[in-house]
Amino acid sequence: MSLIKITNLTFGYESSPVNVFENLNLELDSDWRLGLVGRNGRGKTTLMRLLAGELPDYSGKITASVEFEYFPPRIPDETKPTIEALRDVGGAKGWELVRELMLLGVREEAMGRPFCTLSPGEQTKALLAALFSREGAFPLIDEPTNHLDEPARDAVAAYLRTKRGFILVSHDRAFLDACVDHILAINKNSVEVQAGNFSQWYHNKKLRDEFELMQNEKLEREISRLKDAASRTKKWADKAEASKKGHDPKLREKKSGGWRAYAGEKSRKLQQRRKNLERRQAEAIEQKSSLLRDLEEPEKLELSPLRYHSARLVELRNVKIDYGAGAVCPPVSFVLSRGDRVALRGSNGTGKSSIIKLILGERIPHTGEFFVASGLKISYVQQDTSNLSGSLDDYADIYGVSRTMLRTILRKLDFPREAFTRDISTYSSGQKKKVALARSLCESAHLYVWDEPLNFIDLMSRIMIEELILEYQPTLLFVEHDRAFRENVATKTIELGWIELPDRETLMQQAAGLGQQVL
């Protein structure tokens, strides 16, 4: 065990007038499996890059006895066989790489293929294997799940659960719960560390928020009461002060020395009482100011789904997607009726996106029959938003949605105002995805079709979108590997097939045998 110590760290980008971190102090145990959470733009990736030494222009101090390694690392030559390409990353021995690759469920034949020919999910696993093969390395793992299907996420989570010492950024609640033992949360106005997984941290945060809301209401009432009492006491004190100076003709006969002493003492006590009330009011205001600093209380999202005149919107009967090398999945049959929220579930490559494109009217090679209701208005969010470009206003005009409404929804999703005037091509992956989702939420539709809508989207925004769907109950067809979101939202799940991975004991035996071959 050793400490990673951050002392008085201050950092900001030249393009922004506000620092990302201001006098940040943290002590982290290098043995922790640490989940790093926070809304998009709060500085998660920035913190990782600071630790990795990629952003040297900061003030303060970062000390650690471990060597930070940022994920994903850069592959110098992606045309090399995977094993050789991974050796170039960290210089690990071949048998060590094979062991880690096998534990992650990477197939033996993939190890000899050029790295560039691997699927995005296989590349993610290979790069993780390279990092954990390096002795003394402390991996900084930035959003590894975006290209992983559900079995792959389970395999990576099980793999990470056996490791010690890493920081992981992920927006998948189930994935975090499965593999971390501490949470580092970048909140609205603070940074905190807490033992446990994400669900435990989030439960505690909600309890703290509820307590602070109650305390805030109590203090607001107390401040109002003290303010009124201080105001009344001031009037009484002023009246008592005036009476001792002889300005009241009704009390002229009482203006003896004894009366003046009595009036003076009464005035003094009232003034002191007023000061005490004002002091207590100031203390209550100060106490109140320490509350709700990290309360995430965004405005609620809204949706205006349309109601189709008949119940059946989509039906597939024994549909098989076949691009010429055989069907990519077993025959698919299901009915999507008005009010359904249907999740398509399966491994990468089992035809989920192809079925969506077929329903959208694209020419996808297939057998079987399918029906889509006439005049059905569909709002679609595509899986890949990396090619978005142009101004936000032009994007709104192309889709025929209100510019104001689009910006309003983006602000509710914690989108920075200063980004509104930038070209969309300069946005982060999470910001581009939020633009596509916000546009869909602006559209009134009979059916919402979302293909992996939550990639790169922060946890709080995911929860907001989940609550929106449960409140407005639109008809929805979606693909999403975030298990918690899918299980909370879907009314029906269609299974499209799975690639089964061996259990861990079998993988260990296979890794040992293949490692001996490499040696």
Image (tube, rainbow, N blue to C red):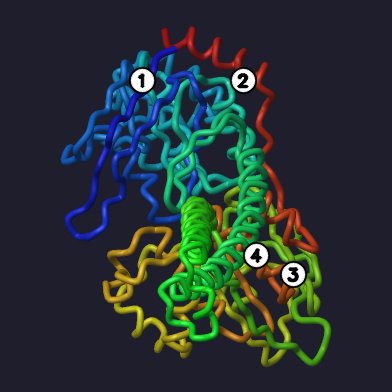
Residue at disc 1, secondary structure: strand
**Separation of residues labelled 3 and 1 (CA atoms):** 52 Å
In contact (CB < 8 Å): disc 3 and disc 1? no
Residue occupying the point 58% across, 79% down: 379
In contact (CB < 8 Å): disc 4 and disc 3? no
In contact (CB < 8 Å): disc 1 and disc 4? no
Mark 4 vs 2, N-terminal side: 4
Placement of the N terminus among the 4 image quadrants: top left
Residue at disc 4, secondary structure: strand
Q: Nearer the viewer, residue 345 or 69?
A: 69
Mark 3 vs 1, N-terminal side: 1
**Separation of residues labelled 3 and 2 (CA atoms):** 38 Å
What is the three-letter code of the residue carrying label 1?
Ala
Q: Which residue is mark 3?
A: 368
**Separation of residues labelled 2 and 1 (CA atoms):** 23 Å
**x then y, percent, for residue 90:** 30, 22
Residue occupying the point 38% across, 23% down: 138
Q: Nearer the viewer, residue 400 or 16?
A: 16
Q: Nearer the viewer, residue 21 or 388?
A: 21
Query: Which picture quadrant has residue 493?
Result: bottom right
Mark 4: few/some/many CA within 10 Å (<14, 14-19, 20+): many
Mark 2 vs 1, N-terminal side: 1
Q: Which residue is mark 2?
A: 507
Residue at disc 2, secondary structure: helix
**Left or right: where does residue 454 sit relative to residue 376?**
left
What is the three-letter code of the residue carrying label 2?
Leu
Q: Which residue is mark 1?
A: 137
Residue at disc 3, secondary structure: strand
